[in-house]
Amino acid sequence: MRKTRVLLFSEGFGTGHTQAAYALSEGLKRKNPHIQCRVIELGNFLNPTVGPLILSAYRKTVSVRPRLVGMLYRSQYKRSLNKLTRLALHRIFYAQAAQVIQQLKPDLIICTHPFPNAVVSRLKRQGLNVPLFTLITDYDAHGTWVNPEVDEYLVSTAQVKKLLMRRDISPEYIHVTGIPVHPKFWDQENQDLLRSELQLKNMPTILIMGGGWGLVFNKDLLGRLASRADEIQLVFCMGQNEKLVADMKDNPLFRHPHIHIFGYRKDIHKLMGASDLLITKPGGMTCTEGAAKGIPMLFYEPIPGQEEENCHFFVSEGLGEVLEPSLLDKWLDLLAERYDTVEAYRRDMMRGISAHLKPDHCADQVLGMLNHEPVVYPQAIQLLADS
């Protein structure tokens, strides 16, 4: 029996889009072994020379001029990608996208980034007859996600569904699935055992994440944290910012047996499980993973735009707070002096998590929507691939 083939397209503008694609892929396969999934960052896959250069420029802009990113986000908020942008994307990155689809013959395409979403929509206008699901990977709905060729929208919250309905998308095509997290985040593991496995002390622990790109935290915050290292274990995870990791390890401020400094890690689920508090940029994926693990969160300087919306959502749900000096001091005191209060807070937090934040909810919803009849690829699609 032929397995149902799901092709997930993403892009590397921020790490969350591709993480969401892999998370959904693994979740679908865990739920149903007859599902075959393939994840591709389409632009990098088709143009491995230009793609990384553009991603590097974007990363630098986010790090150095986040307000500019916010201005661009807001100025284009209600607009889909215009025809000129779509054409440029097609010519520079995606001219061979039809060939990839023809070769892999998926029964379903899921896009977790607006760019491949626009490209597949363009191919559908030209005759591609494969269902297209769009998974919006934030707690907001920017206009660039919207295309009339999309068959189903998978969204994080009921509020995002309302935002899409205001753009004249019928509610029957919008499904509140939540943002998928990898099955590694589905299980609650024993905290003491995790700390032992990770070679951490069995004591109150804070995980500080700089995001996948290792964005820098200010010196005052770092100093406040380091000053409490006798009482509270600090685990810094600075992503791919290798220079920052090296600088922190060379800094006498962080030379303490209770301070651990890491770069990119594949076991974030274990670090979250071993920790009592998460300090992070409010990326949609990181926050959703934190909610799945039931860890309280403090959000540091959201980038204007979608991170602000992510922050607002998790604060409104009672799953996190905006980081301020007095609030940080409160949490440091709680961890050091009233640890039982923190444990009770986490138990209450897990009981109050909404259905769409349950870690396997998205995979269940997608499986329920799947049409298991294989797609027939007519001659017209072969002509697209050859053009």
Image (cartoon, rainbow, N blue to C red):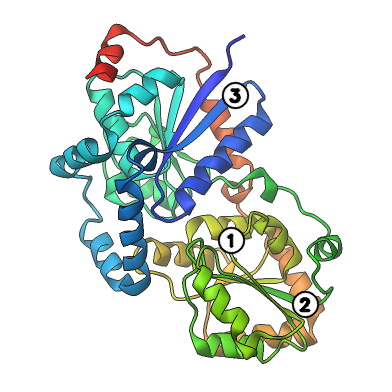
Q: CA distance from mark 3 to mark 1?
A: 30 Å
- When the figure is inspected, residue 301 is found, relative to residue 316, above or below; the finding is below
Residue at image mark 1: 264
Q: Secondary structure at mark 3?
A: strand
Question: Would you say residue 242 is visible in this rendering?
Answer: yes
Identify the residue at the far left of this view.
84
Total marks shown come to 3
In the picture of the structure, the residue carrying the numbered disc 2 is: 204
> Which of the labelled discs sits on residue 242, or is there none?
none
Give 292 or 235, whichever is nearer the viewer.
235
Find residue 226 and report its horizontal and vertical position in percent: 65, 87
Contact, CB < 8 Å: mark 2 with mark 1? no
Residue at (38% x, 44% y) in the render:
113
| Residue 76 placement (x, y as % from top left) | 22, 56
Amino acid type for the residue under numbered disc 1 = Tyr
What residue would you read off at disc 3? 35
